[in-house]
């Protein structure tokens, strides 16, 4: 159950996104012969939007009317006016990126009457509770095992793992609830968090929420994407700081622990808390609380990768748009592979998982032409800086400013 249920959720989500991309993501990019030109109907729509939109090409894609051209008004105002003008109860309006800097205006009549399909059934909150309970068991078991306890011979020591499982689940839960509450506030249909238990390793593959509807605009995609990492960071960072005060510093040659220089952020925090001198040959044996906090930061960094449907993909989509986000995602995967080859082989595993679960495509928002405010752009740059601080090792030239002595000098 711990493996099958999360696998079914992920497979269903992958199939839904694959089907959605196949049906709608290529609007404005299909060959000419796929469209049926009906000048009379297109002319009616062109007249209704001519004060907001200069159409240079018009086509029909099934029941959808596609007008390509350029906006006459500011994108946000144009999108709001188009939504008002075409009754939302009767039409669905999308402003999408097209080629050569043009805009694709898609107007789709909504189905009416008895032919409208009933909404698909959704799993109740009981599934969320069951998965949370299973993840609590597997992470507590893992936490006790990490402390050297044999759970098969010492089952009564199960609760020794609480100092790991409780902060880890809190970090993951707060991260996903950050997405959930912002999604609901922005009018996006989202599920409560699904925790993913596994009976080995860390006891979990994290948690996810399901986005069931399109983002209204790129601002909403950005807000939902960045809310999770910020919320999770607010719990993970204090957990790491307080946990490091009870962690143990050992020589890296002992083959245990995490090297101080493995992360810029970890190196800075360790040097700030250290009572003595640190060297590049030191490693940290995390306490359970610190380990949970460090895993929380790693989860934050992985989610901030600007790829596909990851949090970083939503952020990049808000900042750059759909086409450039896809290009950035390809570069990010390549960099992850290079890190896996030359630095830590675990990044190769994550590159494989991210590629096959999310791909490079981002589902289009209803308005993907309107841009972001300066404040959101600055926050997006800060998110990228946080990704680098967590994932990048400490460069040699930064060791002395951080108070870390290099053993080779």
Image (cartoon, rainbow, N blue to C red):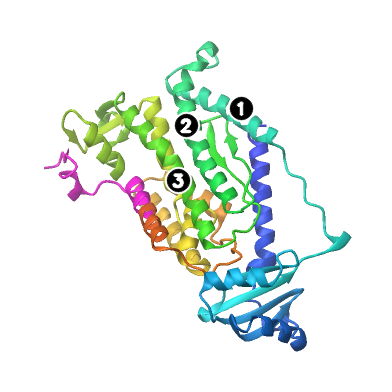
Give above or below for 391 relative to 37: above
Q: CA distance from mark 3 to mark 2?
A: 14 Å
Report the span colored magenta.
384-409
Give the structural element (helix, strand or loop) at label 1: helix
From the image, state whether disc 3 or disc 2 is nearer to you: 3
Q: Position of residue 403 (x, y in %)?
A: 16, 39
Specify whether residue 387 is in view: yes
Question: Hey, which residue is sitting farthest right in the picture?
Answer: 114
Q: Position of residue 292 (x, y in %)?
A: 42, 31
Give the structural element (helix, strand or loop) at label 2: helix
From the image, state whether disc 1 or disc 3 is nearer to you: 3
What is the crowding at mark 3: few (fewer than 14 residues within 10 Å), some, or many (at least 20)?
Answer: many
Q: Which residue is mark 2?
A: 168
Q: Earlier in the sequence, mark 1 or mark 2?
A: 1
Specify whether residue 144 is in view: no
Q: Which residue is mark 1?
A: 133
Q: CA distance from mark 1 to mark 2?
A: 14 Å
Q: Quadrant of the C terminus?
A: top left
What is the crowding at mark 1: few (fewer than 14 residues within 10 Å), some, or many (at least 20)?
Answer: few
As for residue 395 lying within the magenta part, the answer is yes
Q: CA distance from mark 1 to mark 3?
A: 23 Å
Q: Which residue is mark 3?
A: 229
Question: Hey, which residue is sitting farthest left in the picture?
Answer: 409
């Amino acid at each position: 159950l711990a493996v099958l249920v999360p696998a079914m959720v992920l497979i269903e989500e992958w199939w839904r996104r694959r089907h959605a991309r196949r049906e709608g993501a290529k609007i404005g990019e299909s060959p000419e012969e796929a469209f049926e030109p009906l000048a009379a109907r297109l002319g009616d729509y062109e007249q209704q939007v001519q004060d907001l939109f200069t159409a240079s090409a018009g086509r029909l894609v099934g029941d959808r009317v596609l007008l390509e051209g350029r906006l006459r008004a500011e994108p946000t105002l144009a999108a709001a006016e188009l939504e008002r003008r075409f009754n939302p109860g009767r039409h669905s309006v999308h402003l999408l990126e097209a080629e050569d800097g043009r805009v694709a205006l898609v107007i789709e009549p909504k189905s009416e009457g008895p032919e409208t399909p009933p909404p698909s059934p959704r799993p109740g909150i009981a599934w969320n509770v069951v998965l949370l309970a299973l993840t609590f068991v597997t992470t507590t078991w893992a936490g006790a095992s990490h402390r050297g306890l044999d759970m098969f011979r010492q089952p009564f020591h199960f609760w020794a793992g609480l100092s790991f499982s409780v902060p880890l689940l809190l970090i993951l839960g707060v991260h996903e609830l950050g997405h959930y509450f912002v999604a609901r506030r922005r009018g996006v249909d989202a599920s409560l968090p699904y925790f993913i238990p596994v009976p080995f390793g860390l006891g979990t593959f994290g948690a996810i929420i399901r986005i069931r509807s399109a983002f209204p605009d790129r601002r909403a995609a950005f807000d939902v994407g960045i809310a999770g990492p910020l919320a999770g960071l607010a719990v993970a960072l204090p957990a790491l700081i307080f946990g490091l005060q009870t962690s143990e510093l050992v020589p890296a040659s002992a083959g245990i622990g995490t090297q101080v220089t493995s992360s810029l952020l970890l190196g800075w925090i360790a040097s700030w808390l250290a009572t003595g001198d640190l060297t590049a040959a030191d490693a940290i044996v995390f306490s359970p609380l610190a380990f949970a906090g460090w895993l929380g930061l790693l989860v934050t960094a992985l989610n901030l990768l600007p790829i596909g449907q990851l949090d970083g993909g939503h952020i990049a989509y808000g900042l750059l748009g759909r086409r450039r986000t896809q290009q950035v995602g390809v570069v990010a995967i390549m960099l992850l592979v290079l890190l896996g080859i030359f630095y830590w082989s675990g990044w190769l595993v994550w590159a494989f998982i991210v590629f096959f679960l999310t791909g490079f495509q981002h589902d289009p928002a209803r308005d993907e032409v309107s841009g972001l405010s300066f404040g959101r752009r600055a926050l997006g740059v800060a998110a990228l800086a946080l990704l680098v601080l967590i994932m990048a090792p400490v460069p040699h030239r930064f060791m002395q400013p951080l108070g870390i002595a290099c053993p080779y000098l």
